[in-house]
Amino acid sequence: MPHPSAIRLGLNVDHVATLRNARGGARPDPVRIALAAIAAGADGITAHLREDRRHIRDTDMARLKAEIPKPLNFEMAATPDMIRIALETKPHAVCLVPERREELTTEGGLDVVGQRDSLAPSIARFGDAGIRVSLFIAADAQQIEMAAQLRAPAIEIHTGGWCDAVVDGHTEKADAEWRRIVEGVALAKSAGLEVHAGHGLDYATAETIAALPEIVELNIGYFMMGEALLVGIAETVRTMRAAMDRGRATLKTRMA
Ligand code: PXP
């Protein structure tokens, strides 16, 4: 049994596929990296099957589902085609994100308020199939309340704005974004949602956010892949795990 205050580390392997696709061959293999990360302590693997298939491909998703011994989080836009593929793949979880072809990465959160009518049946369909849905949203009260109203089991709070502000040294913006996150995760938890967070996290920001007791999962990709180029994926996972555990330990000290 994991400790009740444990926080899960989900590794996003999209950028292994980005590197592989640069040469059009089979290496590096995202599944092999996923297995090495799990052996080093990652609790799950996230992969985003984009409409344009720019990194992860359909066969990667099928192989991840078949070959990894930990939960697969299938990140996707809620389009009819992607919903069909996800239902066929039967991952542990899906994370619904907005998607624009021209973006470099998922830029904003999902507009759950604006898309409530189309999201409600998708959330219900995944629920019926036993697949946990999380909605990737900004730490915005209206979006969080709507996610709870639509009976999504989980949300993932978009940490990109906060992380960028921290890294760029924009202290005022970073403080404001942090306050939004702290208030948002408290609201989400009180509304009965399981709370995850991700985007732009590095060792320092992961340690900081792991101190929020409401958060049970962090999904991290780009920074960890960059580190893995220098020290390998196993060492990167262990260092990230240690940073998250340090953050969590401050929570236990505060509660003692
Ligand atoms: N969570 C979601 C929903 C994402 O779209 C991404 C980016 O693919 C991540 C987490 C991971 O973000 P990063 O690669 O910046 O760590």
Image (cartoon, rainbow, N blue to C red):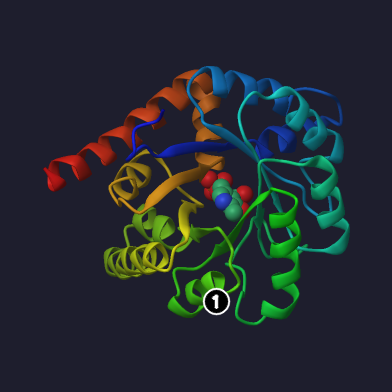
Up-down relation of residue 60 to residue 69 (above or below): below
Residue 65 figure quarter: top right
Q: Identify the residue at image location x=30%, y=52%.
A: 212
Q: Quadrant of the C terminus?
A: top left
Relative placement, left or right, of 181 versus 54 is left
| Quadrant of the image occupied by residue 112 | bottom right
Circle 1: residue type: Met
Q: Position of residue 119 (x, y in %)?
A: 71, 71
Relative horizontal placement of residue 74, taking residue 159 as reference (left or right): right
- Judge from the rendering whether residue 93 lies leftward or rightward of residue 174; answer left or right: right
Q: Is residue 99 visible?
A: no
> Residue 5 location in percent, x, y?
32, 40
Q: Give 165 or 198, whichever is nearer the viewer.
A: 198
Residue furthest front in the image: 128
Identify the residue under disc 1.
Answer: 146
Q: Residue at x 33, y 64 (%)?
A: 186
Number of labelled discs?
A: 1
Asked which secondary structure carries label 1, the reply is helix
Other residues around mark 1 within 10 Å, as few (<14) / some (14–19) / many (≥20): some
The quadrant where residue 175 appears: bottom left
- Decide: is 163 above or below 60: below
Nearest to the observer: residue 105 or residue 94: 94
Looking at the rendered image, the quarter that the N terminus falls into is top left
Residue 166 point in image, percent of width and height: 34, 56
Is 76 or 152 nearer to us in this picture?
152
- Residue 194 drawn at (x, y percent): 47, 55
Q: Residue at x 60, y 80 (%)?
A: 113
